[in-house]
Amino acid sequence: MTPRWRTLGAVLVLLLLTAGFYWKLTVSREWTFLEGPDLANVVRPWLDFEAREFHAGRFPLWNPYEWAGHTLIGQVQPGIANPLNWILFAMPLRDGHIPVTTLHWYWVLIHWLGAVFCYALCRDLKAGYTASLLGGSVFALAGFLGHTDWPQILMSSIWVPLALLFFARVVRGRAAQSNAALCGAALGMAFLSGHHVVPTFTAVLLGGMWLVYIALGARHLRLALPERQARRTVSPPARLGHAAIFAAVWLLVSAVQVLPAIEYAKQSLRWAGAPEPLRWGQPVPYEVHAHYSLGWPSVGGIVLPGISLHANPHVGFVAVALALAALWYRRRDARVRWFALVALGGLLLALGKDFPLYWLIYRFVPMVEKAREPAMAIVLAQVGIAVLAALGADLWRRWWIAPLALGLFLSEAVYDAPHLARFDRPGSYTAMIQGQADIAKFLKAQPGWFRVDFDDSDVPYNFGNLYAIEQFGGVGSSLPVRTHRLLGHAETPRVFGIRYRVARQPSDPAQEEVFRSRSGLKVYRDARIAEPLRTWRNAPCGAPDRLRVVSRAPEVFVVEAELACPALVVAGDSYYPGWRARVDGERRPVQELDAVRAVRAGAGRHVIEFRYRPASVYWGFGFTLLGFSMVALFCLRK
């Protein structure tokens, strides 16, 4: 069998192993990973909204269904900049929602990709086919990756093996420029994936590796494979050039996500576990990092199941035993030394407060303080262990050793498989959402432009995202400062047009019950609240104005205005950089008034158009294209 067919066969075997391991999601219809609070309340509504926008032919950058409008791409975690998510969004919808079966396969296939990427790393390091299957399985089915349910965090983790693969090729002197560019692209893709913690610690680890490579070079590091050790020494300027290529491509590829995220961070408050919400420029306190550290007591959980804190480190006895065997019997092998350092580095970062040097990393390495959960760095150690296990399985030249090790590992992994929830469990989020679906049907039938306030104790999920209903509220870890300032003010319902409330009791005597759900919840209407569309002047005008909503989409809002006198036309959408306005086709500046958007227009009849065209996204997209173009250029030169 040719190597190409063997590789294809290995990829299919990994698919079968992954789908079989998560059979409760791929075969059964009784279990789900979506019953966690964050997944049910935040992630699934986000994905539904993004998928509906894709099917409407729009690329969602702005979310009008949370807090009177919220940047979607700036929040990072919706993962809209991740190209792999676009495949999910393009899949068929059912009643405006992504089918649960599709979401289950999406989650399983993320693990499969992680297994394939780690398999490729092991094969590139000359591990055997079956041993590499073992390495891919250890990475994808156990430990952090096997027990993490957030798709965004999974997506950001699966790129770690590829980044290490291309870096190891650079050190071996194999097409160093193109592989340095590919290493940067892999890390950049991790930053596009929807979560920043694992990519940040991956950047710290890779940064340390690049510094050592620059300082010592491949010959002194002895990281080359045996057949490469005779290759000529790379000069220090050339090594510095390779690192520069890596850094440039990484920063460029990630720009389409990083630039909008920085823009949003400067405009928002973040709840990160500190006593008070944090503004841009305020570091996450070290105490938060200490709280979310893995800690020495959890190190035993690498071998023994059930011992973990904030992240599951368990890869099992078989993987650790094979890794230790590789360390002992192949201790002079450069590959073993190299990935032992990877495993050790990931473990020390994950220990957080229990690693004496972590405070220095937190204090002096840029952006590490934003990555408040060092325990997640255990995934880096897991990659190292997976590679060492694959190399250990090849120690003895017996064909049956690696298959036996794979079988024993899978037995351990099945014993410590992730705990999925049943759809029919008491207090199921799925049952709650289904029971409240009639509320969405009622609200969608109401005329005009309005917003809805939900009682969080009765509707804990982001109802607006799930059903495309404008909600003043929403579950999340951040909020624009301007919006936060208006919370609890008497004029807030009028400013934002909060006409309806969904709860068991009204929040104001003026609210009257207009609908009762089969779930027992009630919908109240405040007849005093009009559409959040008005005019504002410094001086009174002797005649009334007429305003009418012509069309409203997430990123385009068109208003027809007939003004008796010059005025500011005020729309009750949150003010945010990137919104542009045209009055009768003429560009006009968007102004802020009471935390919402306004534009000046003269007397007479006008058509006013607001569009979200954020410069941070456009510049970021251009930089990202440039980064991928650099990768293509270096690879074509090779």
Image: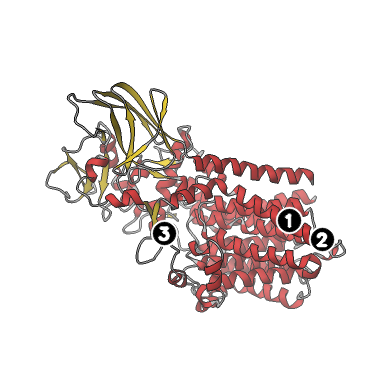
| Gap in angstroms between the C-alphas marked 2 and 1 | 10 Å
Give whichever of discs 2 and 1 has the lower sequence position. Answer: 2
Circle 3 sits in a helix, a strand or a loop, which is it?
A: strand
On residue 208, the disc is: none
| Gap in angstroms between the C-alphas marked 2 and 3 | 54 Å
Q: Which of the two residues, 539 or 219, is positioned nearer the viewer here? A: 539
Circle 1 sits in a helix, a strand or a loop, which is it?
A: helix
| Gap in angstroms between the C-alphas marked 3 and 1 | 47 Å
Location of mark 1 (residue): 242
Q: Residue at x 48, y 50 (%)?
A: 261
Q: Is residue 356 above or below residue 575?
A: below
Label 1 near label 2: C-beta < 8 Å?
yes
Q: Residue at x 45, y 32 (%)?
A: 56
Location of mark 3 (residue): 421
Task: Give the crowd class for mark 2: few <14, some 14-19, many >=20 residues within 10 Å.
Answer: some
x and y percentages locating residue 300 in the rendered image: 54, 78
Q: Which of the two residues, 489 or 56, is positioned nearer the viewer here? A: 489
Location of mark 2 (residue): 234
Circle 2 sits in a helix, a strand or a loop, which is it?
A: loop
